[in-house]
């Protein structure tokens, strides 16, 4: 195959025999943990751990199944009833029949007095019912809701205890929430300036405006450099802001400011 690949089929080099080279296979991969796995498998192995029936002893040849061995057997015969009657008759004798002249014993009560049981018989009262159809269909009156049995209770018309407790808890929770909201509003409320503080601030604003105006008047009439122009703009903005603040404090007598400032 190599000669045909290297040379064309009509080449003389194809006549030279070429030794066939066999490719050697790489050795089979064997894990380095194989001995440890085999050892662990031997240590963990237990009897009857895999699937299959348990090893039991085979029955011996002597305990083979015999004929009629599984048929039900009758109980063994005991002493006959006649013999039992004879033995009882000799051991326990009944008292003789009383004669007509004998008087019965008075004041003896047996375990069950049939006369009293039959004499004191209270007739059963019929359950009150009502008829709801023209064919005589009856229903128990107590379960119909027509009997005023609830208004006869002692606690009729009173508010249950669990409702009173629920209303108390709801009222307490509402009060706690209102107190919390009130405290938050008081913390976040704005501070009210007094008249003295307002006059002091107004005086300071006017003094600051006078200082800026004095600096502004000291500027030259002809502004040529950029620094002079920037100073003029700064002074004009400052005076304009101070004039707005002064007019605000003069116009409003009551002024609020945040507590944090």
Image (tube, grey):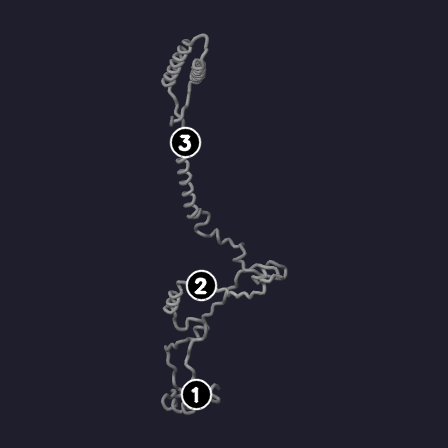
What label does residue 185 carry, if any?
A: 3
Q: Quadrant of residue 131?
A: bottom right
What label does residue 254 carry, if any?
A: none
2 vs 3, front mark: 2
- Which residue: 54% across, 56% down? 144
Percent x, y of residue 8: 61, 59
Q: Is residue 234 above or below residue 98?
A: above
Q: Which residue is mark 1?
A: 61
3 vs 1, front mark: 1
Q: Is residue 82 above or below residue 204?
A: below
Q: Quadrant of residue 248?
A: top left
Percent x, y of residue 32: 40, 62
Q: Residues within 10 Å of mark 1 (few under 14, many from 20)?
A: few
Q: CA distance from mark 3 to mark 1?
A: 102 Å
* Front residue (pair 87, 251): 251
Q: Is 152 left or right of 261, judged from the image as shown? A: right
- Which residue: 38% across, 83% down? 103
Q: Earlier in the sequence, mark 2 or mark 3?
A: 2
- Which residue: 42% across, 42% down? 170
Q: Residues within 10 Å of mark 2 (few under 14, many from 20)?
A: few
Percent x, y of residue 253: 42, 18
Q: Earlier in the sequence, mark 2 or mark 1?
A: 2
User: Label 2's element?
Assistant: loop
Q: Which residue is mark 2?
A: 29
User: Label 1's element?
Assistant: loop
Would residue 247 be seen by someone viewing this image from the given angle? no
Percent x, y of residue 79: 41, 90
Which residue of the protein is positioned furthest toward the front in this rendering?
Answer: 12
Q: CA distance from mark 2 to mark 3?
A: 80 Å
């Amino acid at each position: 195959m190599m000669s045909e690949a290297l040379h064309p089929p009509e080449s003389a080099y194809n006549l030279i025999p070429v030794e066939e080279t066999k490719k050697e296979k790489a050795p089979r991969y064997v894990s380095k943990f194989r001995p440890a796995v085999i050892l662990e498998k031997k240590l963990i192995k237990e009897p009857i751990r895999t699937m299959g029936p348990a090893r039991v002893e085979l029955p011996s040849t002597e305990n083979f199944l015999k004929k009629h061995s599984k048929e039900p057997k009758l109980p063994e015969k005991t002493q006959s009833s006649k013999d039992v009657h004879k033995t009882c008759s000799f051991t326990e004798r009944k008292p003789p029949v009383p004669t007509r002249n004998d008087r019965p014993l008075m004041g003896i009560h047996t375990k069950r007095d049939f006369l009293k049981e039959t004499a004191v018989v209270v007739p059963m009262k019929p359950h009150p019912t009502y008829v709801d159809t023209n064919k005589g269909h009856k229903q128990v009156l107590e379960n119909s809701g027509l009997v005023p049995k609830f208004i006869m209770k002692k606690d009729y018309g009173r508010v249950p205890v669990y409702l009173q407790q629920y209303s108390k808890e709801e009222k307490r929770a509402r009060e706690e929430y209102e107190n919390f909201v009130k405290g938050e509003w008081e913390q976040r409320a704005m501070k009210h300036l007094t008249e003295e503080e307002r006059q002091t601030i107004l005086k300071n604003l006017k003094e600051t405006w006078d200082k800026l105006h004095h600096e502004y008047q000291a500027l030259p009439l002809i502004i040529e450099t950029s620094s002079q122009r920037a100073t003029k703009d700064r002074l004009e903005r400052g005076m304009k802001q101070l004039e707005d603040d002064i007019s605000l404090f003069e116009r409003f007598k009551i002024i609020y400011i945040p507590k944090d400032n």
